[in-house]
Image (cartoon, helix red, strand yellow):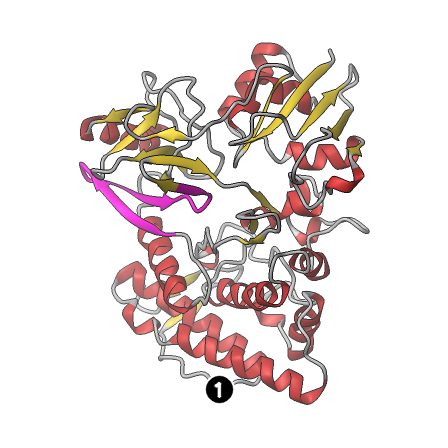
């Protein structure tokens, strides 16, 4: 079946372009004649039209891997490779400011007015939602999903009202949410404090914006409330801000979000990141921040900083590096792959990091570090940054929180030794388990 789909950016009455899926499922995308700006770095406006490979990489990344996708595939007998067919049903609520709707239908998204476009949730309503996400990994049967979200943890998109209570968009309104509430499984509640602590450290030491997170507890059920960085709330009106993740910006399908899965000429790696950063509004600034972001993720044990955990945000015609988000202590989990999602030069583990591979990465992302003086300057700022992180470790005390601090200390020690830096790291007494993960000596 052929599908003709209009692609809109929120706030614009005319489509930016048209996506077409033919009877074999092949895609093509063409900008409209009066499109004012590109929807992706990988789809430049001057090219006007794009065939299947380029169109598929961008638009497939708009589909969330979740129950809604599975339900549409089953109900309408649509194959997973039929991107246009899936967006025909699911594209009104893609991530970000883009909506993909049947041709002629009109924009799928619009700004939301807090006083009329949302249905308030009582504390009991929210407690029931949190309990169901914790125990059953799904929303209660009588709760509609305002914006289906993918991920390991149970999640719901919410809107915070001016009085601090929560609401969800009215059915079919197409208006934005402002927050994401993440609920871990029963027995894994420590994840809330761990992510909150790491993001709090990041907010204190990282020199650019960090997504705001805070614990939320109702009826002894705990979750992590994340403020969406791609939203604007002014005078009671909520608007989406266009953003795209690095898979989209690089024209990569989501199955290539890890560098280790890359193909020749199609990979998430330092050189590809450098090309993206060079096209931002302030390239030198973006490169400095990306290096700092990479060091911070490594020091905090977040080896899972893949291409979909980095994004660009469009506050004007040229994008900027999005705020740091989704920093989790992956190294504390012995059941996952601890190889770097983004290699440091040729290095894919902390233990094999060297000065040479570090500077291969520095140069790949476009930072100038020529000669001894150039390298010394990078090492000086890196050492100062690691010391700022190390100063936060003593605040991580007690049980699993102490284990978190010991893991950070372990990481900083390895990085500083590899780069021959002097960093004041507090003593630690946890040890690294074979295959990954950490345990206290007293356990």
Quarter-of-image position of residue 232: top left
Is 295 in the magenta? no
Measuring from the top left, give residue 43's x and y in whole percent: 72, 40
Picture quarter with the N terminus: top right
The location of residue 379, given as percent across then percent down, is: 57, 82
Provide the residue designation for mark 1. Answer: 422
Badge 1: few (under 14), some or many (20 or more) residues near its Cα, within 10 Å? some
Q: Is residue 28 left or right of residue 391?
A: right
Q: Nearer the viewer, residue 148 or 191?
A: 148
Relative placement, left or right, of 177 versus 12 is: left
Q: Which residues are magenta?
A: 212-232
Side (left or right) of 357 relative to 331: right
Picture coordinates of residue 255 (x, y %)?
66, 41
Give the x, y percent position of residue 173: 41, 20
Which element carries disc 1, helix, strand or loop?
loop
Q: Is residue 137 visible?
A: no
Relative depth, front residue between 228 and 216: 228
Give me the residue at 31% from left, 46% from top: 189
Residue 157 visible in the snapshot: yes
Q: Quadrant of the C terminus?
A: bottom left
Instruction: Name the foreground residue: 167 vs 182.
Output: 167
- Tell me which residue sits at (49%, 24%) in the image: 67
């Amino acid at each position: 079946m052929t599908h003709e789909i209009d692609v809109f950016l929120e706030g614009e009455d005319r489509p930016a372009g048209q996506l077409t899926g033919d009877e074999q499922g092949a895609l093509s995308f063409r900008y409209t004649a009066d499109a004012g700006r590109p929807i992706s770095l990988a789809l430049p406006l001057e090219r006007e039209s794009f065939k299947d490979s380029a169109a598929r990489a961008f638009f497939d990344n708009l589909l969330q891997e979740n129950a809604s996708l599975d339900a549409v595939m089953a109900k309408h007998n649509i194959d997973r490779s039929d991107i246009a067919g899936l967006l025909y049903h699911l594209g009104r609520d893609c991530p970000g400011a883009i909506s993909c709707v049947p041709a002629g239908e009109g924009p799928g998204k619009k700004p939301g007015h807090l006083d009329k476009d949302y249905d308030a949730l009582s504390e009991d309503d929210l407690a029931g939602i949190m309990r169901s996400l914790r125990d059953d990994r799904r929303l209660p049967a009588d709760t509609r999903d305002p914006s289906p979200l993918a991920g390991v943890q149970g999640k719901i998109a919410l809107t915070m009202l001016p009085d601090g209570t929560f609401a969800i968009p009215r059915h079919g309104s197409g208006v934005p949410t402002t927050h994401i509430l993440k609920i871990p499984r029963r027995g894994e509640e420590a994840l809330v404090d761990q992510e909150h602590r790491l993001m709090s450290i990041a907010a204190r030491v990282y020199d650019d914006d960090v997504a705001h997170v805070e614990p939320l507890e109702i009826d002894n059920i705990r979750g992590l409330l994340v403020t969406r960085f791609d939203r604007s709330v002014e005078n009671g009106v909520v608007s989406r801000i266009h953003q795209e993740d690095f898979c989209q910006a690089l024209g990569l399908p989501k199955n290539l979000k890890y560098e280790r899965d890359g193909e020749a000429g199609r990979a998430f790696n330092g050189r590809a990141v450098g090309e993206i950063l060079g096209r931002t509004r302030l390239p030198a600034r973006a490169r400095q921040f990306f290096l700092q972001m990479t060091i911070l993720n490594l020091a905090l044990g977040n080896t899972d900083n893949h291409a979909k955990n980095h994004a660009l945000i469009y506050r004007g015609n040229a994008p900027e590096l999005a705020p740091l988000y989704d920093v989790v202590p992956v190294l504390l989990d012995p059941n996952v792959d601890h190889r770097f999602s983004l290699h440091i030069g040729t290095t894919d583990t902390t233990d094999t990091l060297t000065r040479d591979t570090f500077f291969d990465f520095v140069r790949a992302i476009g930072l100038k570090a020529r000669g001894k003086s150039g390298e010394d300057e990078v090492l000086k700022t890196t050492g100062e940054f690691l010391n700022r992180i190390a100063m936060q470790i003593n605040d991580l005390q007690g049980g699993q929180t102490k284990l978190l601090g010991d893991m950070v200390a372990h990481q900083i020690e390895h990085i500083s030794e590899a780069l021959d830096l002097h960093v004041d790291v507090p003593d630690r007494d946890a040890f690294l388990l074979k295959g990954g993960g950490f345990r206290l000596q007293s356990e």
